[in-house]
Image: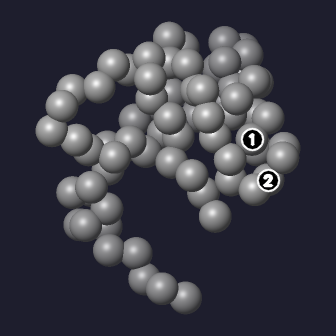
Amino acid sequence: MEQVNFKNLAATYNIRKLEKEDQVKSFDCEDADLNDFILNESPYYRQAMLAVSYVAERKTFKKLSRRKAMPLRCG
């Protein structure tokens, strides 16, 4: 199993909570249940205080709108 280099990961990505105003337009981790949860159900779980979802966003030199955030593809 490959060891994760957290220093490089932190230099490349910001990890933050998926906020209620975020709109996930695209996500595919090759798991239909997880895809459905992130795309459709996570806001309801957050509102009911059952779960908090996080996203990893690739750092860029331009500031991106938080409304266009996409979770990191898993798998």
Q: Left of 5 or right of it: where is 38?
A: right
Identify the secondary structure beneath mark 1. helix
Residue 7's place in the image compared with 11, above or below, is below
Q: Residue at x 21, y 26 (%)?
A: 63
Distance, label 1 to label 2, CA atoms, is 6 Å
Q: Position of residue 56 (x, y in %)?
A: 43, 45
Q: For the residue carrying disc 2, how many other residues have a C-alpha within 10 Å: few (<14), some (14-19), or many (20+)?
A: few
Tell me whether circle 1 and circle 2 mark residues in contact (CB < 8 Å): yes
Can you give x and y, in whole percent of width and height, for residue 39 in the image? Answer: 70, 29
Can you say which quadrant of the picture contains the C terminus? bottom right
Residue 49 visible in rendering: no
Q: Residue at x 29, y 25 (%)?
A: 64
Specify whether residue 31 is in view: yes
* Image x and y of residue 41, in percent: 76, 24
Q: Residue at x 62, y 34 (%)?
A: 26
Q: Is the N terminus in the top left, top right, bottom left or bottom right quadrant?
A: bottom right
Say few, some or many: other residues with alpha carbon within 10 Å of mark 1 (under 14 / 14 to 19 / 20 or more): some
Q: Is 49 left, or right, of 30 in this rendering?
A: left
Q: Residue furthest right?
A: 33
The residue lying furthest to the left in this view is: 61
Examine the rendered structure and indicate whether residue 51 appears above or below residue 61. above
Q: Position of residue 52 (x, y in %)?
A: 59, 30
What amino acid is at disc 1? Asn
Residue type indicated by callout 2 = Asp
In the rendered structure, find residue 51 and report the number of the disc placed on it: none
Residue placed at 40% from the left, 35% from the top? 16
Which quadrant holds residue 35? top right
Question: Which residue is identified by label 2?
Answer: 31
Q: Which residue is mark 1?
A: 35
Secondary structure found at label 2: loop
